[in-house]
Amino acid sequence: MFAKIVILAFIVLEFSNILALYFAPGSKYANAVGIFRAWEKSKEDPEIHDFVRYLVYWVAGAKLIFLFLLGVITLFGSSDLQRMSLVALSLATLSFYWRLFPLIRKLDQNGQIKPKNYSIVIGVMIAVFILFFALAAIIS
């Protein structure tokens, strides 16, 4: 049951990000891309802005597919499958620290993200997700 709760909580959180990416990508809430100064700057060049918007919507679409699969696993999957999906979530989410965290940290240090030190906030938030996924996999 704890596995289901953790997965459903993650689905709700990530769905808020999907809504922000599709309907308010320039927002600074729900991990939308408004925190990046380059979002506004890209609007100066319509071709670049269209490309950036395409990538934002692509990420939102990929997340939506992923969340629907998690929803199916939560609703119809066995406890073992739910537990293994939490292990998979933990491992996949760790990839954030391989490419994304170094990049967002660099952008943050170069003053390209507002609010300042947002990279630390997102880094800690991702670590908490991984911790909850692992704990739920162990406890369930």
Image (spheres, rainbow, N blue to C red):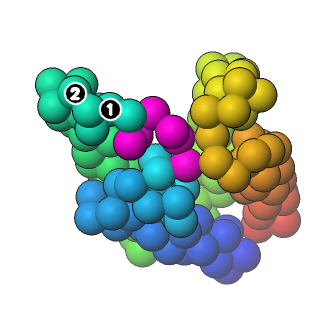
Determine the secondary structure under disc 1.
helix
* Residue 12 shown left or right of residue 123 in the figure: left
* The image quarter in which residue 31 lies: bottom right
Q: Which residues are magenta?
A: 35-40
Residue 81 appears at what percent x and percent y? 55, 55
- Nearer to us in this view, 101 or 88: 101
* Residue 124 shown left or right of residue 13 in the figure: right
Of the numbered discs in the image, which one, if any, rests on residue 54?
A: none
Residue 4 appears at what percent x and percent y? 60, 73
Determine which residue is flagged by label 2.
45
Indicate yes or no whether the magenta region holds residue 37.
Answer: yes
* Residue 35 shown left or right of residue 60 in the figure: right
Determine which residue is flagged by label 1.
42
**Kind of residue at badge 1:** Ser
The N terminus, quarter of image: bottom right
Q: Residues within 10 Å of mark 2 (few under 14, many from 20)?
A: few
The C terminus, quarter of image: bottom right
Determine the secondary structure under disc 2.
loop
Instruction: Compute the Cα span from label 2 to label 1.
Output: 6 Å
